[in-house]
Amino acid sequence: MINSILRFGLIFILLILLQVLLFNNIQFSGYVNPYVYILFILLLPIELPSWLLLLLSFATGLIIDFFTGSPGMHTSATVLAGFVRPYVLRIVSPKDGYESGSDPSMLIYGFRWFFSYALLMVLVHHTALFYLEVFRFTDFFRTMLRVLLSTLFSMTFILLIEFYRRGK
Amino acid sequence: MRNLLNFLARYSNLIIFLILEGIAFYLLSTGNSYHNSRLVNGVRGITRGIEEKINHTRSYLSLRFINETLAAENVTLRNTIAKLARRENSLFFSVNDSVNKQQYLHTSAEVIENSINRQKNFFTINKGESQGIKVDMAVISENSVAGVIVGCSKNYSVVMSLLNFNFKLSARIKSNGYFGSLSWDGRDYRYAVLSEIPQHVLVNVGDTIETTGYSAIFPEGAMVGTVSDYEKFGGDFYKITVLVATDFKKLHFVDVIGNMKKTEQLELEKLFQ
């Protein structure tokens, strides 16, 4: 128990630092900004109670907001992602269900499962985030392009990190 | 009562979700005017220390480039002094008061946090109220428009970048003096849009766009950019795409410009409105 709290605390700090120090400084042509911190929400244990998941999402979003100076934006997108996670897990659930007490990682459930799980989650998060940022529906398709391109980049980095974790 | 408890237990997650989203949206709505949000300002004090460190590291990498621009700026400044010294002789003031001759006060500052990829971009500079910075002062970088101060703390200020939906600037075509309104359409960080220029005006690709000074924020004649494209928009006006002179991607040192005669101008204008 204590062990896993420590482990997730470490992942949490690492991802936030990675996001703030590295990924927030990557800005391709005004369209693309990878948001990799969402990986923290992806990796939390499957059996984590929903209220705790929501609170953790809230905290994650709030911290990112304070670093990017966009109060509320990342918070609401991440809370939404935390809220839909149980439903996404149900949609992508493997044939013989989840093992009890396991983490939703690539190591246990394989690449294809993790890819669809991460893609759905990242899409939900990014869609909420970018439409909240613009806060209007003019330029609807341009915002959608931003969502898709950023999803592509976030997914690339998330998969890289997961491959690295698996490799170890 | 039992029904109520059952209901709460059943939908507890939804309720927590709605409460948390409520808080987030509250932050979103109050925080977008940015400097109004006390909470954000308080916590940003902590994150700023880290941002300053990141910026410190980054500034080492571009020292050579910064030296070059500073040297170039020195040359232009020396030229201006020489020109002004000549002109001084032919100018006269009814009262010999050297204070009256200076209208704009420059303060240099360093950008410690910047973004270009959002729709409402802000950046933070390392000077604040203690250094005489106030809200509504102009921010320029190498003589071209960068933004307007929207919030100050003791030692830091937040600047609304030109790359912000809400940024509006009165700008004119240098060659013929017709003025319009410049804003950013959120597409590309290199281009802004100048509207309200009537179609009978002669516009050429490459024309210089500069500030008018009507708003009493920006000094007159500060560079904005050059015309890169124009098309007819509606019946009467052009929609002119302007290549912005400031490179927001490597914004580092900026000048904050305070108009010392601003209150005088605004009060006079108020009398006639």
Image (cartoon, helix red, strand yellow):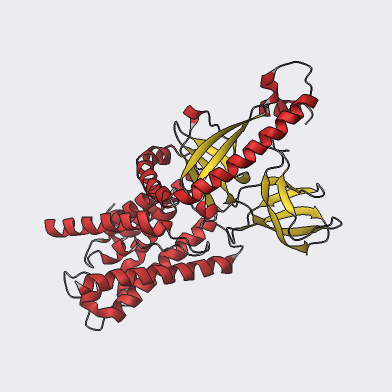
Left or right? Give the position of A111 relative to B230: left
Q: Is residue B132 left or right of residue B207?
A: left
Counting labels gives 0
Q: Residue at x 49, y 61 (%)?
A: A130
Q: Look at the picture and state if B201 lies above or below A44.
A: above
In the displayed image of the protein, which residue is found farthest to the right? B200
Query: Hey, which residue is sitting farthest bottom in the picture?
Result: A95
Left or right of residue B48: residue B176: right
Please tell me whether residue A108 is drawn above or below residue B189 in the rendered image.
Answer: below
Would you identify the image quadrant in which residue B83 lies? top right
Q: Position of residue B176 (x, y in %)?
A: 82, 49
Tell me which residue sits at (27%, 71%) in the image.
A162
Q: Of A95 and B68, which appears nearest the observer?
A: B68
Residue A70 in view here: no
Placement of the C terminus of chain B among the 4 image quadrants: top right
Q: Position of residue B210 (x, y in %)?
A: 71, 47
From the top left corner, tell me how far across and down residue A23 is, in percent. Answer: 39, 59
- The front one of A96 and A62 is A62
Instruction: Residue A48 in the image: state x and y as whole percent.
Output: 22, 62
Q: Is residue B45 visible?
A: yes
Residue displayed at 76% across by 30% down:
B87
Outermost residue toward the left? A2
The image shows residue B108, relative to residue B8, as above or below, that is above
